[in-house]
Image (cartoon, grey):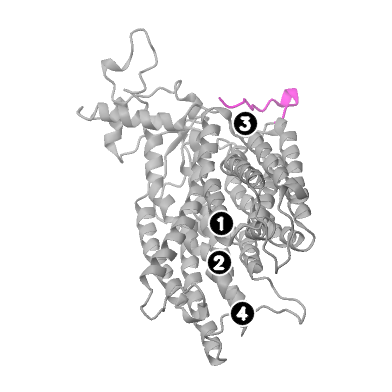
């Protein structure tokens, strides 16, 4: 049950939750992002220059760490939704993450925990098994910690706004904008300030600063405990989903009831998983409704509760339907992440070949081009919240301005434009290289400004501000309330799937485009001889097909109908399935 938060004004007690809790919650997210991005951005450099790892081994370590960190949110969400609750999951996970960061910092500071330094003309001594063990344990701890923080911070923050209170409900969608803004701002600091400290001052301070920030954020988050609106876990949501499937299968031969009102409902048994409201019956996937058909075998003698492996309430059946309906929309977000992922690979390689000089003595680091993505994303969020929504609110009459489905659709269109533009910029870059006789000189700087890449970086940032936030909002809003940590974990899983999909696509294109004369769309040694523009336009075509798929899914999608417990009427959710 929820900790009761009645407005006891006579006793001077305030309602828990609300905007006052946001600084404490955002601080935890900022600390985690500073540490994660600040380390990951430069991790390959740390592994090769400080631990003297071979490039291949370092790359595999980076990939394995990233894959593990992308999967652990599912575990963290399961723990939070099943028995631990979101506050304690975030707190314990943050402490685990802190231990991992302190361990990494100590390894960077203490000489015995890393191999001795060497000159460029010397054969460097690799880290020994003990030193590598400290590295791997530290990375594992940070991956486990991220798994508890990432899915729960979003859901926990949104929990602070009571959906049965009309005044607070309008703040929920704004929360997602400002959550993403804080995340983007901390990432911007990480890729600039933290990376600068690592490169110019040292890894001890470069890892120590995020560690200190994380420690402060944990203390602040815990101090805010008396203010939080805490949702108690209601048991394993996965068990309930499986129970509905098993019950529907056992009763597959039963005839469907003529009236849905005859299906089993029990508000008392569902109270802990329907605090914000009860899910109403929908007409889709009627075969699952058989799990709610009552038979005499469903109740043991003298028991008021049914055997859940034979009989489930309508609310529990609708939980499963909601999850299934979300699947196609969730999957549509994977391709946008695939397109976005090219910024850290081929777009970065493009930047390395271009003129990056701002002055005679200063060059923009190729890896810092993501600053344009992050800056545009932050500006777009401000524009969306302060200008776009008020204008659209007057046009549509919606409090949110537009639905999250429409927001996602806009993001998809901008992402298509980003990869389309990237292809034309690559043609311009190669033409300049050819006209200056640099096609076969991959290590020479091409006399074309790196700022030609700004449009594609900026468009990706704009697309993320629309699509990714809309995606996150959709997953939280449309998931069963007892599975919201799991739903936000799916957001991170989509990011992992997009990155893995990028690896698969690059591998396939590299292998299939290889010619007998050594030509390749994506050559290993000289981007000037490749056909990177074809690769960008292939992604553009895939995104167009994905947009068509998304529009179809959004057109037939049924938003979950919910009956609010406080006033016993259907909640004002957006019931139009159209984008």
Magenta residues (range): 1-14
Earlier in the chain: of badge 4 and badge 1, it is 1
Q: Residue furthest top?
A: 302
Q: Does 345 appear in magenta? A: no
Separation of residues labelled 1 and 2 (CA atoms)? 23 Å
Element type at mark 3: loop
Q: Which residue is mark 3?
A: 230
Q: In terms of secondary structure, where does tag 4 sit?
A: strand
The residue labelled by disc 4 is 354
Residue 343: numbered disc: 2
Of marks 1 and 3, which one's residue comes earlier in the chain?
1
Query: Residues at badges 1 and 3 in contact (C-beta under 8 Å)?
Result: no
Image location of residue 411, percent across then percent down: 50, 62
Give the quadrant of the N terminus.
top right
Query: What residue appears at the point 57 percent right and 42 percent down from the top-left corner?
Result: 147
Mark 3 crowd level (few <14, some 14–19, many ≥20, 10 Å Cα) = many
Looking at the image, tell me whether mark 3 or mark 2 is earlier in sequence order.
Answer: 3
| Helix, strand or loop for disc 1 | helix
- Relative to 275, is 561 on the left or the right? left
Residue, disc 1:
57
Q: Select label 1 or label 2 by which is in front.
A: 1
> What's the CA distance linking mark 4 and mark 3?
52 Å
Q: Earlier in the sequence, mark 4 or mark 3?
A: 3
Mark-to-mark CA distance, 4 and 1: 29 Å
């Amino acid at each position: 049950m929820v900790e009761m938060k009645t407005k006891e004004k006579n006793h001077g007690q305030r309602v828990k939750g609300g905007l006052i809790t946001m600084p404490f919650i955002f601080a935890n997210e900022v600390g985690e992002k500073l540490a994660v991005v600040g380390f990951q951005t430069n991790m390959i450099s740390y592994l090769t220059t400080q631990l003297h790892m071979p490039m291949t081994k370092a790359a595999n370590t980076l990939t394995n760490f990233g894959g593990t960190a992308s999967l652990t949110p599912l575990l963290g969400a399961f723990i939070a939704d099943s028995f631990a609750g979101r506050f304690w999951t975030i707190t314990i996970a943050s402490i685990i993450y802190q231990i991992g960061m302190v361990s990494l910092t100590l390894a960077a500071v203490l000489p015995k925990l890393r191999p001795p330094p060497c000159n460029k003309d010397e054969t460097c001594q690799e880290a020994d098994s003990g030193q590598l063990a400290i590295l791997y344990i530290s990375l594992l701890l940070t991956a486990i910690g991220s798994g508890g923080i990432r899915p729960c911070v979003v859901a926990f923050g949104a929990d602070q706004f009571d959906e049965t209170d009309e005044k607070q409900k309008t703040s929920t969608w704004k929360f997602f904008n400002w959550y993403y803004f804080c995340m983007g701002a901390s990432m911007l600091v990480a890729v600039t300030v933290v990376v600068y400290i690592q490169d110019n001052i040292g890894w001890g301070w470069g890892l120590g600063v995020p560690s200190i920030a994380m420690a402060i954020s944990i203390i602040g988050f815990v101090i805010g405990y008396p203010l939080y609106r805490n949702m108690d876990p209601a048991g394993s949501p996965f068990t309930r989903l499986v129970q509905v499937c098993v019950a529907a299968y056992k009763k597959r031969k039963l005839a469907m009831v003529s009236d849905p009102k005859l299906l089993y409902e029990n508000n008392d048994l569902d109270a802990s998983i329907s605090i914000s409201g009860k899910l109403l019956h929908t007409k889709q996937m009627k075969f699952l409704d058989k799990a709610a058909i009552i038979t005499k075998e469903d109740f043991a003698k003298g028991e008021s509760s049914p055997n859940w492996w034979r009989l489930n309430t309508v609310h529990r059946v609708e939980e499963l339907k909601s999850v299934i309906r979300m699947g196609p929309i969730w999957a549509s977000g994977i391709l946008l992440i695939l397109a976005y992922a090219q910024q850290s690979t081929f777009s970065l390689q493009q930047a390395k070949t271009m003129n990056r000089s701002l002055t005679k003595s200063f060059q923009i680091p190729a890896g810092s081009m993501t600053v344009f993505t992050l800056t545009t994303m932050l500006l777009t969020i401000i524009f969306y919240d302060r200008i776009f929504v008020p204008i659209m609110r007057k046009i549509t009459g919606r409090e949110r301005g537009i639905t999250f489905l429409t927001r996602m659709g806009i993001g998809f269109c901008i992402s298509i434009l980003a990869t389309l533009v990237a292809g034309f910029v690559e043609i311009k870059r190669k033409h300049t290289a050819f006209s200056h006789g640099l096609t076969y000189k991959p290590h020479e700087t091409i006399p074309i400004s790196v700022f030609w890449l700004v449009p594609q970086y900026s468009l990706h940032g704009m697309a993320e501000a629309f699509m990714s936030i809309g995606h996150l909002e959709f997953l939280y809003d449309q998931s069963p309330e007892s599975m919201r940590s799991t739903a936000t974990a799916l957001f991170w899983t989509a990011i992992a799937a997009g990155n893995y999909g990028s690896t698969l696509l690059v591998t396939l294109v590299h292998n299939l485009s290889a010619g007998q004369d050594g030509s390749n769309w994506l050559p290993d040694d000289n981007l000037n001889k490749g056909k990177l523009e074809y690769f960008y336009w292939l992604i553009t075509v895939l995104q167009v097909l994905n947009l068509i798929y998304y529009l179809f899914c959004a057109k037939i999608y049924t938003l979950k109908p919910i009956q609010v417990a406080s006033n016993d009427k259907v909640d004002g959710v957006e019931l139009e399935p159209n984008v």
